[in-house]
Amino acid sequence: MMLDWLVPTLISVLLVLAGIGAVRRMNMWRAGQAEKVDMLAGLLAMPKRYLHDLHHVVDRDKYISRTHVATGGGFVLAMVLVVFVHLFGVDSKILAWALLAALVMMFCGALFVYKRRINPPSRLSKGPWMRLPKSLLTFSITFFVLTLPAAGVLPEGFGGWLLTLVLSVLILMSLSEMLFGMTWGGPMKHAFAGALHLAFHRRPERFGGGRSTGLKPVDFGDGVSVKEVLGVAKPTDFKWNQLLGFDACVQCGRCEAVCPAFAAGQPLNPKKLIQDMVVGFAGGTDENYAGSPYPGIDLGHAKGAPNQIITDGLIHPDTLWSCTTCRACVEECPMMIEHVDAIVDMRRFLTLEKGSTPNKGAQVLENIIATDNPNGYAPASRTHWAADQNLPVMKDVKQADVLFWVSDGAFDMRSQRILRAFVKLMKAANVDVAILGDEELDSGDVARRLGDDATFQSLAKRNLATLSTYQFNKIVTTDPHAFHCLKNEYGDFGSDALQNVEVLHHTTFLNRLVKDGLLQLEPFKGGKVTYHDPCYLGRYNGEYEAPRELLASLGIDVAEMERSKFRSRCCGGGGGAPITDIPGERRIADMRMEDVVSTGASMVAVGCQQCTAMLEGVVEPRPVVKDIAEILAGQLIEETH
Amino acid sequence: MSQYDALFEPLNINKLTIRNRIVSTAHAEVYATDGGMTTDRYVKYYEEKAKGGCGLCICGGSSVVSIDSPQSWWSSVNLSTDRIIPHFQNLADAVHKHGGKIMIQITHMGRRSRWDGENWPNLMSPSGIREPVHRATCKTIEVEEMWRIIGDFAQAARRAKEGGLDGVELSAVHQHLIDQFWSPRVNKRTDEWGGTFEGRMKFGMEVLKAVRAEVGPDFVVGMRITGDEFHPDGLGHEEMKKIAQYYDATGMVDYFGVVGSGCDTHNTLANVIPNMSYPPEPFLYLAAGIKAVVNVPVIHAQNIKDPNQAKRIIEAGYVDFVGMTRAHIADPHFIAKIKMDQVDQIRQCVGANYCIDRQYQGLDVLCIQNAATSREYMGLPHIIEKTTGVIRNVVVVGGGPGGLEAARVAAERGHKVTLIDRADELGGQLVLAAKAPQRDQIAGITRWLVMEIERLGVEVRLGTAASEEMIKALNPDVCILATGGRPFLEQNPEWGAAEGLVVSTWDILSGKVEPGKNVLVYDTICEFSGMSAADYLASKGSLVELVTDDIKPGVGIGGTTFPTYYRSLYEKEVIMTSDMLLDKVYREGDKLVAVLENEYTAQKEERVVDQIVVENGTRPNEDLYYALKPSSLNKGQIDNDALFDIKPQPVLAEEKGAGMILWRLGDNVSQRNVHAAMYDALRLCKDL
């Protein structure tokens, strides 16, 4: 029988071709920069990472998660059994029946993949991805039929030459997709690269319920030997496992669906960005890309090569500067790709090497360098806001239970209201608190997100040096951006200033005070209230509950927005986006306020001065914007003397 | 990030950190009524300013250190006894609680007071020269008395310190005892307490030394001085620079407050608290001159009302602190509103000087346009809270200050408010008042109210005469009539108003009637409208005689405002005639003849003129009220017990829908003033 030798031959040939493709693909990744990875541990951890962490993300969409379990699980099992049954010719009814079962499972899954592709949402890429369900169905049907004789259901050699021919063509088609395509750039690439990405992920801390959101510091060398390039100029400047990560993309567009810049019509689409990265390190153009473009930029003109400067023809700098670093894309990515790392890496090159931070960017960075604050205020005016607060200053008291990290809201009249409200609450609870006063410097958040890691590191080191001279148990701040830097990024600079120190956002701290009965609060009697999760508090640091518990303690039943908690939509204020100010069709803050309005709330509670500023920038009439500290302070029952 | 950052740069006075550059300077509150002891009313008044963000309050203008400097006339604070100390503690706590600082002005007023009351003392002055403004005769002070008063100053400062206040301000301005010694106009002594520069300085210097010795180096001791007395025989600017330097050199003075002008005549007194006829900050140059020669911070008030103006003054470095005292009387939340980015919501002082003019009549200081000021203790709010009860449909008829305030307060409470006015412009009589020369700023009252009702979404229907049918069709839960009045020219039929022989001041100010060539203004009211009409006519070239049957034209206008009218009227050669009533008017050819009769002799005189303008007050427009009254739930009645006690009107307890509540206020009831109308509006509507 022709099939007896044709099937194993086809399988063998395609497996060999797949192997060649895999080596070729791996070489593309290896063109990236070295990064130390514990390969063995990663490979061993991979199944668990897949079944637990990745599935956890995929499972947010039950339809596709079940579909994928059936299709992917069915395929992996079927492929292994195909090798035994059809390549090695193991004659076992049990194996054959198992293979049939796997193929049925895969077939069922593939039907749902097919169904979803009938009228696919705009976030899904089309092109070869439209072919995939057919390939999956073909694979499952073909091998089902092929396996029937092995299972004893049909006699050997049934069907005659016509069927043999048809089956041969179908085998070739489906195996091409499933094996050859896997390593030669077809849709199935995601399985190959995705699995390895899980094993060799640059942030292994993310798995097993962990969180890893701090940016990796730029290595400025020892100051004598200068590194070749700061940040990422060319695709090969990325770490090899970042390149691997880009290749894992399934183009599901979940990132696109949550990206605030994309929704605002700014020229950014995280999915396209990742695909452009692939175009970059693999070489070529974006003409085969079959998803949504960057708003306002036509497809087909982007060209890249592994050693070509990315912003020279592959990606417009505006795309990189549109990002608010809100991490919504990272949070949604089922393949655990790190979009924000990549964007900031490329910004570092633009800022540090080219000095081309757009719009107010350069000025803000100069201000930070000259005055240690982004708006260039006289450093000696940092504590003006507190002239009437009677707050102890660390310089005088040397130690306190709580160090209140004031942040640059100190210079801003609106933010000062938040600071004063928080101080009022701390005083009411008799917290032993002190501030750094004029010794405090900008946390470096804006500099870092704008790509100026040198200034960030300088600020971080100087702040750490100041902090190391005082004794305190907790550091509390009303600014989630400073909170993130202190908690997740200052640790990279070899200081023990924050060792054994709890870094807390004020909502977390206030929630403890309320739970400990240290604040007497009146129930809130105003209208409906919703809560906006700040990105740097929520997605970056996982604090979703404390603000809600605080509101609940006032008797507020939060009218949740559809996009809330880990799905919260950015206010548009992060990542220096208001500074680089890339034009779009609408403002992100306006869209966020529409989310607020849709709940019918008359007030939106926030926990971030930047969110406050952005949301209050929306033209009235609109709901009132208040920090949770302000709301609490308004309900504080003050002792009367 | 704010254009007002300069105002929010803290600055130390001695060791005391003031959180911003805005000061409420010393003024007599006329509230410390309990034997000179500060009352709850006093504390709440200053607490409100501190709550509103004011950096430093200097309270107690002309608070006395000695029992022979009478305090009862202005009900000023009495620091001559230790009884004051616990009262100060309450005051200091209330202000400190909100991050504010508080000091008190202390003084012996010498001859500048009245002797006919309280302890009936002999007033004292360096050379026994009479003070004209208070018609105060006095004795020549003796050395023993000087030393005793110097000691009294020190003890008063101690009481302020023990009471927890942040400092004292020695008053050496407004012709009090210290500057009576300084001024060669009053000090004619030839002993060591007069004559030479050092001699004239000696009393003040001894006071300063004694106070500083008593309170120690860290307690704030400031001095308020004049920048120029504007009297040829008084203290000039160069002399004052020398004096400031002389005291500054001791290192014992922590700041200087500088006031332009002396004030021992009616005319100079008007300079001290410049009303709306003055330009902004007219005497800043004097304070800047003092700042140029001293090493400590300088504070200056006088017609600084706007945050931009204040910021410009601070940024330019003319002075270190701006006094915004009346600005805070009009809106104690002035600073908070800047910080809340609500500068447009600041109720700005218009310089009507209702506050200070009441003070000079020995009445409590009130704001013409903010009825809550100084009534905080009664529970009248500066910030109107939204109601948690039913939302009512409120219709206000009449867009004068009373109607506007009612609409504003009702809208702040969250009600649905419709405001109807017959005119095409809001403001009622304020529209007319603002037409007069130097009186345009009174329109600021309207401007703020209109901006507020726009912000609050009040529906305004202009050019609409309300009728009974229209009101009923609107189906209001509450209808407030503030339809004002109309000129009352028909009181004496002999005036011939019916035949058109006389016109009203409204006709003139509104431009409805062209000014005549030769005009007689007859004013029985003697407040603003008659004076304004005369001034308006004169400014248009009319030859004007202003006649009243009262004791002098403008007698009802207070001490800082009648002088600016007089300056203007005398300059335009307006003839002012008192004690003559208008008996009758008749026409003779193309002329009008006014028959005047002397009140005291009944002797008659005639004036042949082209135009006769009569100001005889108003009669209420009450037709609509009486039409609506019978069918209203409360028959139009206001419960005075509740009203005066700042309690909700009992009728509000009735279920919504039980019927229309009808209230009327302002001149629609009887002729009173802007404050009266707005006070009623606020206290009626704050509990809606």
Image (tube, coloured by chain):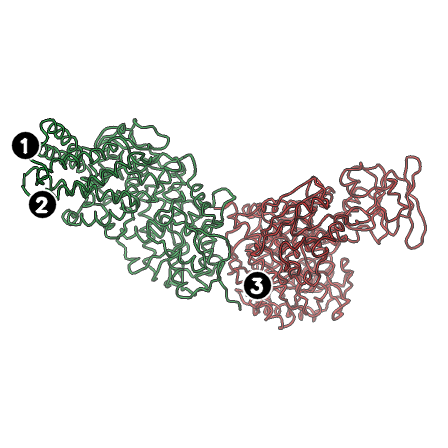
Where residue B391 appears, x then y in whole percent?
Answer: 59, 52
Mark 3 packing: few (<14 Cα in 10 Å), some, or many (20+)?
A: many
| SS of the residue under disc 1 | helix
Where residue B590 appears, x then y in whole percent?
Answer: 90, 35
Do dots 1 and 3 share one subunit? no
State which mark lies toward you, 2 or 1: 2
Residue pointed to by mark 3: B167
Q: CA distance from mark 2 to mark 3?
A: 99 Å
Chain identifier of the red chain: B
Where residue B248 appears, x then y in whole percent?
Answer: 58, 58
Residue A506 in view: no
Do dots 2 and 3 share one subunit? no
Question: Which chain does tag 3 point to?
Answer: B
Residue pointed to by mark 2: A94
Q: Amino acid at mark 3?
A: Gly
Q: Is residue B163 above or below residue A357?
A: below
Q: CA distance from mark 2 to mark 1?
A: 22 Å
Where's the N terminus of chain A, which quadrant? top left
Q: CA distance from mark 1 to mark 3?
A: 106 Å
| SS of the residue under disc 3 | strand
Between residue B382 and residue A162, name the one nearer to us. Answer: A162
Residue pointed to by mark 1: A5
Mark 2 packing: few (<14 Cα in 10 Å), some, or many (20+)?
A: few
Question: Which chain does tag 2 point to?
Answer: A
Q: Is residue B360 above or below residue B530?
A: below
Between residue A134 and residue B541, name the one nearer to us. Answer: A134
Circle count: 3
Chain identifier of the green chain: A
Whether pointer 2 and pointer 1 mark residues with C-beta atoms closer than 8 Å, the reply is no
Residue A354 in view: yes
